[in-house]
Amino acid sequence: MNGTESQQTFIHINWSGTHSLKDVESLNGPEDFGVYQVYGNHPVYGSGVLLYIGRAVKQTFKTRFAQPDHVGTWQNNPDAGRVEVYVGRLWGLKTPDDETWNRHIILAERLLIYVHEPAKNAQKELKRLEPDLRPVHILNWHCHRDLLPEVSGAAWTGFADNRSYCHFSTAHNVPAPIKP
């Protein structure tokens, strides 16, 4: 993608939750892929805090949460019984091909992490994905909890850094006012 304004990518995410860690064990169906949020206790920020945003790409939410890096992290939380999970499935008019679906999950996760800075996510930079994220718009629907309803790559990346903008009041092509 070259980041021009005419080539925008809209990623709609339909969120559901609250799910317990036990509930996530049942999320193993053909639609159980996407991004997720984990809320819980943090020693500095308190309880009910956005701790982590992750992705389940090429694996279900159940499979992702069963991996060793997740099992220990959330079950060892000081208030593990109150850890809450929200899962986000990509949503649209038609199911995209697997490559597009997986790519959108990766882009959505990275931009959501960058914008919301969850306490336990170590990787918070855009890095090599920044050019691909410039034309991306994420729309969070339903139970998105603490996430912003809409996140734009144009606003959060360096999209406008090298553009020459002028104030509308100083533009040379100002249309004539409409007469009543």
Image (cartoon, rainbow, N blue to C red):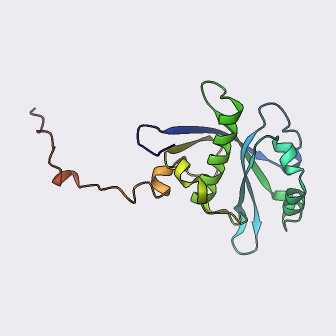
- The quadrant holding residue 176 is top left
Say which residue appears at 49% left-offset and 45% top-offset. 135
Q: Nearer the viewer, residue 102 or 64?
A: 102
Q: Nearer the viewer, residue 39 or 162?
A: 162
Q: Position of residue 3 (x, y in %)?
A: 46, 46
Say which residue appears at 52% left-offset and 51% top-offset. 131
Q: Nearer the viewer, residue 23 or 104?
A: 104
Q: Position of residue 164 (x, y in %)?
A: 30, 56
Q: Position of residue 26 (x, y in %)?
A: 88, 39
Say which residue appears at 66% left-offset and 50% top-offset. 109
Given the current orientation, which residue lies at the most extreme top position? 94
Question: Taking 85 as reference, is 73 left or right?
Answer: right
Question: Taking 113 as reference, is 179 left or right?
Answer: left
Q: Is residue 30 above or below residue 103?
A: above
Tell me if residue 146 can be seen: no
Q: Position of residue 28 (x, y in %)?
A: 86, 36
- The quadrant holding residue 143 is top right
Tell me if residue 7 can be seen: yes
Q: Nearer the viewer, residue 170 or 53?
A: 170
**How many labels, in total?**
0
Given the current orientation, which residue lies at the most extreme bottom position? 44
The quarter of the picture where the C terminus appears is: top left
